[in-house]
Amino acid sequence: MNNDQHTSSQRQNRTKEHLKQALIELIKEKGYHSVTVKNIVDYAAYNRSTFYIHYTDKIELAEDLLVSMLQGLEASVGKPYTPGHKIYTAKLNAPSFNIVSYIYQNRDFFALINYDDTLPGLHTQFPQTILKIYKEQFIFETINNIPVNMDYFKHYTAYGFYGLLQNWIQNGFKVTQEEFIQEVIDLTKTHIHSIKYIGNY
């Protein structure tokens, strides 16, 4: 890729980010179904033709926004872990929860769960992504190795974590990341003995 191409792809990415940001703000203002392409380009100060270079319609923009944010969520999880290493929950610390920092850094986007007429698929795909992370990236050991149906256990813990996240987001992130993570760690210790990160294979 030569420099011109590189600059042009950076510019395209920036344009897409602006369009996504406009969609987020407009959903909060008027609800997803009321938002038009015209609203989006007016808000982002682009013209329609610029929009159509990147997306065929609002639906495609919405899908790109959802997919890119949830892929980012999946990718953020493994940063603090070494694949194959077992971590005892008694020793868990804040950096183990990079996922929480990712959500906080992108809180503009994740606050969209507070709205009824919101980004299509967000309410189902956000918790499903957490479940997918638990299923694909981690091996859990229960306290005292109590035998459980691990599939059920992962559903239970993933949706429990999602419930806590939802509460944090709905309360406008009032509790600091550190306090929130500490609460999650305290709860995790009640039923998980160790966590092994297996990464994305």
Image (tube, rainbow, N blue to C red):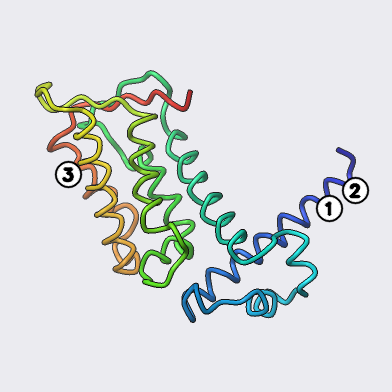
Position of 133 compared to 148: left or right?
A: right
Across and down, in percent, residue 20 comes to: 60, 64
Badge 3 density bin: few <14, some 14–19, many ≥20, Cα 10 Å:
some
Q: Name the mark nearer the viewer: 3 or 2.
A: 2
Q: Which residue is mark 3?
A: 187
Q: Amino acid at mark 2?
A: Asp
Label located before the other in sequence (3 or 2) = 2
Q: Which residue is mark 1?
A: 8
Nearer to us in this view, 178 or 40: 40
Nearer to us in this view, 23 or 167: 23
Q: Which residue is mark 2?
A: 4
State whether residue 182 is above or below residue 123: above
Residue drawn at x 47%, y 35% is 79
Give the image quarter of residue 149. top left
Q: Secondary structure at mark 3?
A: helix
Nearer to us in this view, 20 or 31: 31
Q: Amino acid at mark 1?
A: Ser
State whether residue 84 is above or below residue 137: above
Residue drawn at x 43%, y 66% is 112
Instruction: Give the quadrant of the N terminus.
Output: top right
State whether residue 40 is above or below residue 88: below
Across and down, in percent, residue 45 comes to: 72, 77
Across and down, in percent, residue 155 comes to: 24, 39
Badge 2 density bin: few <14, some 14–19, many ≥20, Cα 10 Å:
few
Residue drawn at x 76%, y 73% is 48
